[in-house]
Amino acid sequence: MNESGDVTRLLPDWSGGNQEALDELMPLVYNELHRIARRTWTGQNPGHTLQPTVLIHEAYLKLAGHEKKSFQSQAQFFALASMAMRQVLVNHAHSNLTQKRGGDQQVVPLNDVDPGTQRQAQEVIALNEALKKLEKLDPRKSRVVELRYFGGMSIEETAEALQVSTITVTRDWQAARAWLARELGVGGLG
């Protein structure tokens, strides 16, 4: 059986509560998860302390502990992985800001503090808060942004994960980017 067939077989097993299925599944999907993590990395500051491999491993821990869901496709699994990566990035950003405000009680010379890292953490948190607002207004548009921006999915992959047409995803993506640009007071997402 090829990798795609193995993934298709393992997803329902994991959804049914078989933890070993997730352990067997992860090596098969690792390359795709790494691609998603690299896409998420685009535009990050070079000194960012959370590397793509760590992001994947943290997302794996979230997936391993996730309440079981029923997957109808690989795209839905990767959508869940994208959500896990978003949560890891947001948690990491919150942690960075807490540490910059003295949360770890370590004295750091002012010239050692990287303002780019702090600004980036603030941007991730602001985007996350804006996505929470958008989710209340239009959950599908929020998911489109999450999958496209945090998950690095194409229009086609996003459409498959959400089980809607590519035209719907394109419209939602454009509308969500415009809404977020207004909400965040910036030029929007790429």
Image (cartoon, grey):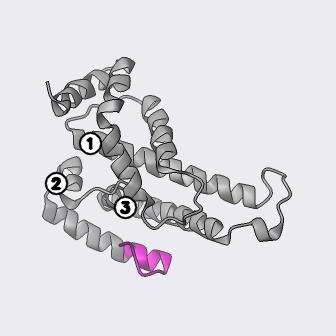
Q: Are marks 2 and 1 in contact (CB under 8 Å)?
A: no
Determine the CA span between mark 3 and mark 1. Answer: 16 Å
Which residue is rendered at x = 73% and y = 55% of the image? 99
SS type, badge 3? helix
Q: Which residue is mark 1?
A: 76
Q: Residue 13 placed where, x, y %?
A: 27, 21
Indicate left or right for 108 with 80 as reference.
right
Q: Which residue is mark 2?
A: 164
Q: Quadrant of the C terminus?
A: bottom left
The answer to whether any part of residue 150 appears in the image is no
Q: How many marks?
A: 3
SS type, badge 1? helix
Q: Which residue is mark 3?
A: 149
Mark 2, other Cα within 10 Å: few <14 / some 14–19 / many ≥20: few
Image position of 136 with respect to 72: above or below: below
Q: Residue 93 placed where, x, y %?
A: 59, 57
Which mark is first along the chain, 1 or 3?
1
Q: Which residues are magenta?
A: 179-190
Q: Which residue type does callout 1 highlight?
A: Gln
Which residue is rendered at x = 23% and y = 39% of the image? 74
Residue 45 picture quarter: bottom right
Which residue is rendered at x = 35% and y = 53% of the image? 151
The answer to whether any part of residue 116 appears in the image is yes
Determine the CA span between mark 3 and mark 2. Answer: 18 Å
Residue 178 picture quarter: bottom left
Q: Residue 87 placed where, x, y %?
A: 49, 48
